[in-house]
Amino acid sequence: VISLIDLTATTLTFAGMERPIGMQGRVFVGAHADPERTYAFSARDRIDETVNRIRSVRDKRFHYIRNFMPEVSFLSLNRYKEKCFLVKPLMRELLVAGKLKGAPLQLMAKRLPDEELYDTRADPHEIHNLANSTDPEHQAALQRMRAALDVWMVETGDRGHIPEPPGVVA
């Protein structure tokens, strides 16, 4: 389990340099490798004009996502993304034309699930949400990942619940 913050620590070690005190990144390969991570965490709050709050955690097998604003989906307008990622307007066209089915249609839903859980070994493209699965293994993973995310949010002082002033977003 590797986090993006591990790249800098690893690169510094390859260059023969010491990590600065307090650097959270871990060295993930080589003679000076640190112990493996159990989890890698992610956060998203706003991209340009699109205010959102998503938190996620991964382990070696599962990816858990908590959508705090499930009404803000891939379908939500974001002018930056519409111009830079031409697949977004194309997906909108295909949706209106009724030409989407399966996973692409799911992606264009107006609302996201509150929680998502994916078995990345069995489903590397994260198509089948297991959050509502009755399988005991999936339920155990869901409970474990929820708890890990809750602890991380408290330990890091996650401030995503505090809205930005409207003027900043504007």
Image: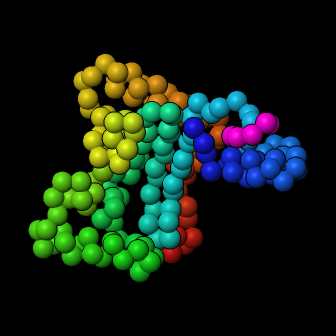
**90 inside magenta stretch:** no
Residue 38, located in which quarter of the rendered image?
top right
Q: Quadrant of the N terminus?
A: top right
Which residues lie in the magenta part? 28-32
| Nearer to the camera, 60 or 164 | 60
Residue 38 visible (yes or no): yes
Left or right for 123, reference 148: left
| Residue closest to the far left | 98
Q: Residue at x 48, y 43 (%)?
A: 56
| Residue closest to the far top | 136
| Nearer to the camera, 52 or 167 | 52
Left or right for 73, reference 45: left
Q: Residue at x 84, y 53 (%)?
A: 15
Q: Magenta: predominant secondary structure element?
A: loop
| Residue closest to the far bottom | 83
Image coloring type: rainbow
Is 29 located above or below residue 73 in the figure?
above
Q: Residue at x 21, y 76 (%)?
A: 93
* Residue 120 pos. (x, y %): 40, 39
* Residue 19 pos. (x, y %): 84, 46
* Residue 47 pos. (x, y %): 50, 66
Is 129 located above or below residue 168 in the figure?
above
| Nearer to the camera, 77 or 35 | 35
Left or right for 104, reference 76: left
Q: Residue at x 27, y 54 (%)?
A: 111
